[in-house]
Each structure stands twice: as C-alpha cells, then as structure tokens.
Image (tube, coloured by chain):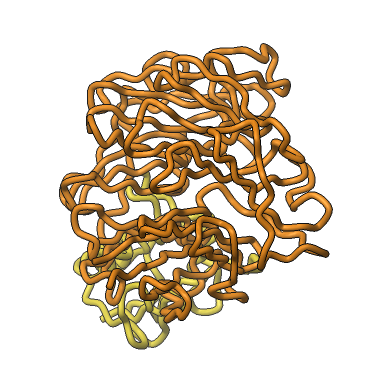
Chain colours: A orange, B yellow
Amino acid sequence: MSKVRVLVGTRKGAFVLESDGKRERWDINGPHFAGWEIYHVKGSPADPNRLYASQFSGWSGQVVQRSDDGGKTWNPVGNKFVYDGVAGTHQWYDGTPHPWEFKRVWHFEPSLNDPDHVYAGIEDAAMFQSTDAGQNWQEMPGLRRHGSGPHWQPGAGGMCLHTILIDPTDPKRIFIAISSAGAFRTDDGGETWRPINHGLHSQYIPDPDAEVGHCVHRIALHRSRPNVLFMQKHWDVMRTDDAGDSWKEISGNLPTDFGFVIDVHAHEPETVYVVPIKSDAEHYPPEGKLRVYRSRSGGNEWEPLTKGLPQSDCYVNVLRDAMAIDSLDACGVYFGTTGGQVYASADAGDNWAPIVRDLPAVLSVEVQTLP
Amino acid sequence: MIRVQLPGHLRTLAKIDGEVKLEVDGPVTQRSVLDALEARYPMLRGTLRDQVTQQRRAFVRFFACEQDLSHESPDAPLPDAVVTAVEPFLVVGAIAGG
C-alpha cells in the first residue's frame, strides 16, 4: 500500500509526518533542528529518500541540511551563497537603491530526474543551484541581470524568491516567483529569463500594470498541462493558459482574493485550491472561519470547504509554501497554519482533520507519495 | 591549547559535547581561533562570521575574561588567560528574545 510523508517546516524546527494510504493515523517525528527556523523541506522526485532542508536563525544565519534516508538522519552541507560578480542594488522599501545581500533560503526545488541537482530560491531574490547534492552553490545570474533587477523591491516578508516550478515536459523551462517583483520564466535552463506579468494589476505600485513590481505570493501548475499556471497574488487570484505570456483574473466569488497559497489537484487539472485571507493588514481568515476554497472549473466559481475546519474564532494565517497535494488516487490536500496545525483531507478537500495541532508556526508543508 | 565554548544550538549543529579544545598555530586572535574552529567543524562556517567578508554576524558576541571582545580587531591578541587556557573564549548569542 502506498504511503505519504509530509515534510513540515516551522519557526522552531522541522517535523516529518508519515501515514499509510488511508491517511488516518500519523506518526510524527521531530523536531529536527530544534529551535531553528525551517523555511522549507523538500524531497527529490528522483529519490524520495533524498531531502533538502533550509535551516536558518537570526543569530547563526543559513545552514543547509540533507538527508539521504527520508529524514531519519541529516547532515549539514554547503551554505555558501555568493552572488555572481558585483551584486548591485535593488529598490528598498522607500524606493532608494539598496545593496543585494544574501539572507536566507526560502525554497528548494530538486530536479525532477537527478537527486544531486537542486535549485534554491533565496532572499535577496536570486536563483542558485547545486549539482553536487548541496555541497556547492552557484548563482544562475541571468535572472538578476535580465534588466529589471534594480527595480525589484521587498514585500513585507523580504525580497524572496519563494516559488520554483520545473516544467515536467521540458526541464529547461522553469517558472519562478518573487515578492515583490513578479513571475519570471526561462526556456533555456536558466541562462536567460524574462518577466511574465502581463495582465497583472497591482494598485500598490506606481504603474499598476508595470512589467515588474507585482507581489506574487505563489504559483502552481498541474504536471499534465504546464502551460496553465495559477497564481495567488497579494490581491487577486490569476490564471494563464500560455505559460505566463498573459494572465486573467479568476477570483470570481471568493470572499476575499487576498491570500498566500494556491495549489492544483493531482488528477484534475481544473481543480484549484486557495485559502482566502481577509486582507494584507489582517492576516487571518474572514469572519474567523478557516475555509479552503475549491474551484472545479479552473477558477471564477469557488466553493467553500469547511468540514473539519474551525468555523469560529479562528485567526491563523496560511503562509505561501504551506499547502501541498499528494498523488494518491483519492487526492490528499494538506496545509499548515501559523497556529501550528497541519490539516489534511484524504478526499480532495471534502473533509478535513488535523494531523497535528500544536506545532510552532508552520512555514512550509510538502508531501511525498511513496510506494 | 585554547578552550572555546559555543551556544547550545551550534554545539548541536556541530555534534559537539561540551567545551571545544583547539590547538592554534601562531598568534592567538579571534581570527586564528575561528579559523581553527571552522577547520575542525566545517559546518560552523557562516554561522559565526560571514564566509566572504569574515565579519562577525550581528547577533554573535565574543566574550572572555569578563570582557566583551566583540568589537575588538579580529587580529588583536586574545587575553593571556585565554592563550593559557585558564579562561575559555566564549561565543555567545546576543540576547534578542526568541
């Protein structure tokens, strides 16, 4: 019977949660790296026992951990992230130039076919990669140097490259997203990049339709249809059918179109999930009701999913890397909250239950479907 | 022989039990002690000082002999009591909540 392994990064350590395919009973292992902020833990699609974890503290900076046995044991690997050449400047919050400085790794994206090849999205926003299982890291400088870099600016969480999506049909095509610059695409394995933000509209920048400057919170795709991307922007839920060349809004009947996470059903490319959050100032669900919204039509028409989720007095947030989907026949959906709960649904969102209730604030959730 | 005490989370990271005892060649300074420490425990690189600029991380402090040496030159000699292992060189996380 298949198993699932949920990898949870929190403000004070990492946790590995495992269950059989029924997803009813869970073994909880952790905390790993107790006391450290774990921004992200992700497994290699090519070798599910190969995991990469981003371990950070304000005192001691960035550490990268690697496991070769599915999270039972870990070893630190390389943590030297040096920008290629002269780093230059981006915009600071007040619009003045500010030097590019490495702060932390937000996201690891292992290659689809080589467990030793892994991409890292970092703050201040840049793309790095390692081809030796995390021992050494090299910037892919074409992203910062394509021309708009000096105009990027940090969002409230920092200027982070937080999403990396590899096209499963063409590994040289990679989509990334940066707060607060927007979405970008390479078609040549990271040598050259271009902004893909046409159709985004953001009132908080001087030109609401500018080529860059949009605070994209998350993008997602279905592996069978990589030209279709879904986006949760700072405000607005968006969709593109042409690999980002143009976007249209699909917020439809959502109670608010602010939020962080977005993901796609494993077997239904038109089924999309978001967790609406009240506003950019009020980072909690509207009316104190924690609701996942599901669209089965690729957007615009959304239904609230509430069974098993708190429907009163709930004021947690769900951060951008804290939703994941398994690939079992009955698709599982998972998300973590800043209140320390990890919720799971083993029936595509119809019913929910907490796997665990009292972790530190959850920063990221990933899931592996294991044989 | 130089004695070095590290914060608990860095001892865990480096799998160190208790105090570190280091042999340091040449003048005993912050830089030579940290060089020797990082050579023996490579996983500590970047956690105490920047790997490129060698600047002390902002929330890391260096104490010895009841003195704050954080703002001394990294090439200044450490106190004799540290050099003779009467006192440890203390690496301390700044008090910053959390």
Counting from the top left corner in percent of width and height, residue B71 is at 52, 57
Q: Is residue B44 above or below residue A324?
A: below
Say which quadrant the C terminus of chain B sits in. Answer: bottom right
Q: Position of residue A332 (x, y in %)?
A: 46, 59
In this rendering, the answer to whether A355 lies above or below A125 is below
* Left or right of A106, for residue B98: right
Identify the residue shown where x is 47% and y is 26%: A183
Percent of width and height locating residue A177: 47, 32
Is B52 on the left-hand or right-hand side of A364? Answer: left
Q: Residue at x 47, y 56 (%)?
A: A39
Residue at image coords 50%, 30%: A99
Report if residue A107 is visible in the image.
Answer: yes
Whether residue B84 is visible: no
Taking depth in this image into account, of B72 and A242 the one nearest to the observer is A242
Rendered location of residue A302, percent (x, y): 65, 40
Residue B43 lies in quadrant = bottom left
**Nearest the eye: A40 or A330:** A330
Please state, as top left, top right, bottom left or bottom right, where the N terminus of chain B lies in the image. Answer: bottom left
Comparing A26 with A121, the one in front is A26
Q: What residue do we see at 58% from left, 36% from top?
A: A232
Q: Quadrant of residue A251?
A: top right
On the image, which quarter does residue A340 sit in? bottom right
